[in-house]
Structures are given as C-alpha cells and as structure tokens.
Amino acid sequence: MVKNLQKEKMSKKTRRKDRVRARILGTFKKPRFSVFRSNYHVWCQLINDEKGETISAASDKELPQKLKSKKSKVKIAYEVGKLIAQKARKKEIKEVVFDRDGYKYHGRIKSLADGAREEGLRF
C-alpha cells in the first residue's frame, strides 16, 4: 500500500514537471531559472537551453553559517533567491523564465522566487 502511494506521488510530480517544461525554454538574454530542493538543501541555476550550459548557480551551502543558524528552511531559501539574483545582476541578466521543476508553488519554492524578485530579477 505504501509503495503505491509513493509511486503515485512521484508520478504526479513527473507529470507536473513535464507539463511545465513543455512550455519553458531559456535563452542567453532570458535564461531558465531552475530550482531543485531536497529535504535539507535548495539549489537553483540559470540555464541557457540553446547552448545547454549553466550560466550561474547558487545553493544554501554557499551562504555564511551566520545566515543559516536558527533559521527555517523557508527563510534560507529566500536568502538563496537573493544570492542568485545578485549573481545574475553581475552577468547583466534582468529577466528569467521560472522553472519550478514540478514542485508546487508554495513554501520554499515561493520564498526563493520572492527573494529573487526582491533583488530585482523579473519573471
């Protein structure tokens, strides 16, 4: 019984991911802002799909320990969003296409997007 529930959950995530990715394509001027989260960490990348290369990347592992201590995962994701937006600004990227990678748009995913928007990245 439990295995079937887990398979169904992964199947739904895969369908959401395929549905989202069918409509998204990143270019150099407007890269794809891809997000991945695990139970403990969050990663994001700016990807140029035309060349198949990563322009920039950020994760919570890059944040100073002072920012991570005694903060929730949602607040840490917010800081990662701000970090990737600062890296994008250095490369003169102002606009991106958001790829939530099949995750529902709430919690850490929403917080990461809000942090990037606050630093000036447009979706």
Image (tube, helix red, strand yellow):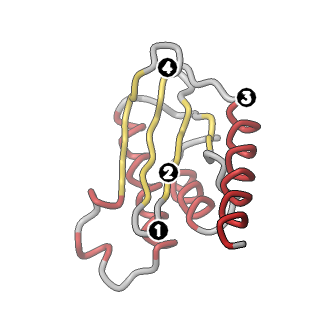
Which comes before the other along the chain, label 1 or label 3?
3
Q: Amino acid at mark 3?
A: Ala
Residue farthest along the top direction in this orientation: 51
Residue at image coords 58%, 25%: 26
Residue corresponding to mark 2 = 36
Residue farthest along the front direction in this orientation: 1
Alpha carbon distance from label 2 to label 1 = 10 Å
Q: Amino acid at mark 1?
A: Asn
Which comes before the other along the chain, label 4 or label 2?
4
Q: Quadrant of the N terminus?
A: bottom right
Q: x, y (%) of residue 82?
A: 44, 55
Residue 39: which numbered mark, if any?
A: 1
Q: x, y (%) of residue 103?
A: 65, 55
Residue corresponding to mark 4 = 28
Which comes before the other along the chain, label 4 or label 1?
4
7 vs 94, left or right, is right
Q: Looking at this view, is 35 or 113 the one in front?
A: 35
Q: Looking at this view, is 3 or 76 the one in front?
A: 3
Q: Would you call the spot at circle 1 few (<14 residues within 10 Å), some (14-19), or many (20 or more)?
A: few
Q: Amino acid at mark 2?
A: Phe
Alpha carbon distance from label 4 to label 1 = 31 Å
Residue corresponding to mark 3 = 22
Which comes before the other along the chain, label 3 or label 2?
3
Residue at image coords 49%, 19%: 28
Q: For mark 3, give the secondary structure.
A: loop
Alpha carbon distance from label 1 to label 3 = 26 Å
Instruction: Kindly report which numbered mark, 4 or 1, lies closer to the viewer in this rendering.
Output: 1
